[in-house]
Image: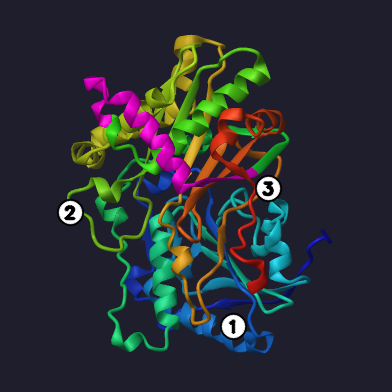
Amino acid sequence: MEKIKVEIISRENIRPSSPTLSPLRTFKYSILDQLVPFPHAVAILFYPSQNLSEFPKRLELLKQSLSETLTLFYPLAGKTKDDLSIDCNDEGANFVVAKVNCPISKFLRKPDLNSLNMFFPITPYLEETTTGAHVTNIQVNVFDCGGIAIGFCISHKIIDGESVNTFLKVWTERADSKRNSKPLTEPNFATSSLFPAGTFYFRDLSKKIWGSLLKEEKWVTRRILFKNSTIATLKAQIVAKSSSDPLKKHLNTPTRVQILSALLWKCFMAASKAQFGIQRPSMVINTVNLRRKMEGSLHPENSIGNFLWFTTSEHMSEHEVSLDELVSKLKKSVEEVDKDFVARLQSEEEGSLIMENALRKISGETWSINKGEEALESLAFNSWINFAGYDADFGWGKPIWGSSVGKEGNLVLANKIILIDTNSKDGIEAWVTLDEEKMKHLVSSTELLTYATLDPSPLPDSSKL
């Protein structure tokens, strides 16, 4: 395939349609915001071919509706002040327009993941949000057929996955010419009041801990598709195996995410054994949305911020483990995060101790103290299930594909998997990033290939594009 070229056409700041009130000019991060390992929340939405002559009109609509949206999401129109706050100075979002030298169908037929970063206005993930950096960065890419890809990088210090969903919902509502007949979504910036930083400062510890998981290797990202029918087959196997054991009754209701996480974890351990010749101990790091774990009265609707907690599940034995056992470990770690846990997390003294211990466990520090030099391998999962990007209709239809980032450079978070719904909701894509050798073993796994398809085209029907 001919090398993709992306040429910048214009750069500007999109400012909010109304000024931010003086009392709101400084936005303070919550204590949970300090724990987030990545500088940016990122995604790209790909829209099918359109009449190219309509692009200027659509671009203007995107700008106007974004301006209105930033009035409500006022911290997103500011710049990073320091590790504790945002200067809500109304300087606006960094907004870039670019043209791509091919039809969108050509790119999507077999997406080159190494080219995805070209659709962003800045280097995602590893370009730290330094003092004076824009909180919001958006690039609108127009293909020569009229197809559009919107790439956005928003500071992860203020926004998590569900916050991104709310942002996209508000933005598309403001772009809807018939919006007057519908109630409009209003964001709520409640995180810093529900989880105030107080006198605690975890940013340096968080950087140190997560930094210990950044490895310099030759990394590879592959997309692995699991159809819902296949996931249902796996679930039936797990339920059947556990039905005769009263101690495993809780396994009758595993989620799709837990089933796939367990399968990928199992295959990851097998790949590691093939790579090193021994079964190394391993730990899975998962993110949990605390909104669903809080008392309803404490959870404002459309709350913006990092309502995230990181759980860990471990398998320390050298013996091979069954799929249902791994599902059980994953379920247990998530179920421990309940309303009582969240209440403890909100307690000033107990909460800070819980956070510090969790960070040290994630880094493997507590393992090293107990086990010495024996290597512990970590595998981090992030769920994008129910990603609202697929409903983001600005007036010319919904996107046909939502993507993450491909190659991030040589220094990345070791062993990472993102799970995201397919556009048609008929399955889940796993974006798997591993070192080159481990990936070679993973994608040749008979167990994995029984249930999965490697690097499928996201095009539902190329003749329509």
Per the image, label 3 sits on a secondary structure element best described as: loop
User: Can you say whether 272 is above or below 234 in the image?
Assistant: above
Which residue position holds label 2? Answer: 296
Farthest residue, direction right: 2
In the image, residue 226 lies in the stretch drawn in magenta: yes
Q: What residue is drawn where x is 62% and y is 48%?
A: 126
In the rendered view of the protein, which quadrant contains the N terminus? bottom right
**Residue 433 percent location from the top left of the image:** 61, 39
**Frontmost residue, 50 versus 309:** 50
Marked residue nearer the N-terminal end (2 or 3): 2
Report the Cα–Cα distance between label 2 and label 3.
Answer: 39 Å
**Residue 316 percent location from the top left of the image:** 46, 15
Marked residue nearer the N-terminal end (1 or 2): 1
Q: What residue is drawn where x is 24% and y is 45%?
A: 293
**Frontmost residue, 327 versus 375:** 327
Q: What residue is drawn where x is 53% and y is 54%?
A: 40
* Protein image colouring: rainbow
Per the image, label 1 sits on a secondary structure element best described as: helix
Which residue type carries mark 3? Lys
User: Can you say whether 54 is above or below 197 in the image?
Assistant: below
Q: What residue is drawn where x is 29% and y is 87%?
A: 181
Report the Cα–Cα distance between label 1 and label 3.
Answer: 28 Å
- Which mark, residue 59? 1
Which residue type carries mark 2? Gly
- Which mark, residue 407? 3
Whether residue 189 appears in this view of the structure is yes
Q: Which residues are magenta?
A: 222-250
User: Can you say whether 121 is above or below 238 in the image?
Assistant: below
